[in-house]
Amino acid sequence: MKSGIISLTVTDVALEVLWVGKLAVSFGTLAAGSEMRAHSAMFFEFKEGKIVSQRNYDCFESW
C-alpha cells in the first residue's frame, strides 16, 4: 500500500443554510425585535482557490 498526501481540487460547493435575523426596525407587519427566518441553498464555483460565482435561492418563512 502506498502512503502519501491526497490532493483534492474542489470546483463546486453546495450549502443548505438556515438564516435567522432579528429586525432592528419594523418591516411590513413585523415589529422591531421580531425574527425573520429563511431556508437557503447556496451554490459556489471556485477557480484557482477563489470564488468566481455564487447563486442563492432563499425561501423566507411566513410572517
Image: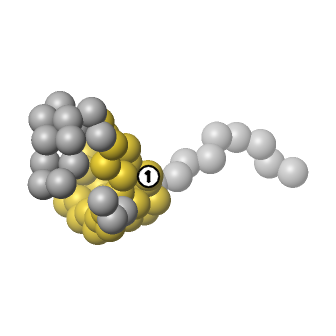
The image shows residue 12 at horizontal and vertical percentages of: 38, 63
Residue found 70% across the figure and 40% down from its top: 4
- Quadrant location of the C terminus in the rendered image: bottom left
Residue type, numbered disc 1: Leu
Q: Which residue is mark 1?
A: 18
> Can see residue 19?
yes
Which image quarter: residue 33?
A: top left
Q: Residue at x 17, y 31 (%)?
A: 24
Q: At 22% from the left edge and 48% from the top edge, which residue is drawn?
A: 30
- Name the residue nearer the viewer: 38 or 5: 38
Image: 4 above or below 61: above
The residue carrying pointer 1 sits among few (fewer than 14), some (14 to 19) or many (20 or more) residues within 10 Å by Cα, namely few
Tell me what residue is drawn at x 13 percent, y 41 percent: 26
* Extreme residue toward the right, this view: 1
At mark 1, the secondary structure is strand
The residue lying toward the viewer, choosing from 12 and 33, is 33
| Image-quadrant location for residue 47 | bottom left
Q: Of residues 63 and 53, which is closer to you in this image?
A: 63
Q: Position of residue 61 (x, y in %)?
A: 36, 62
> Residue 53, image x and y in percent?
20, 60
Given residues 34 and 9, the one toward you in this image is: 34
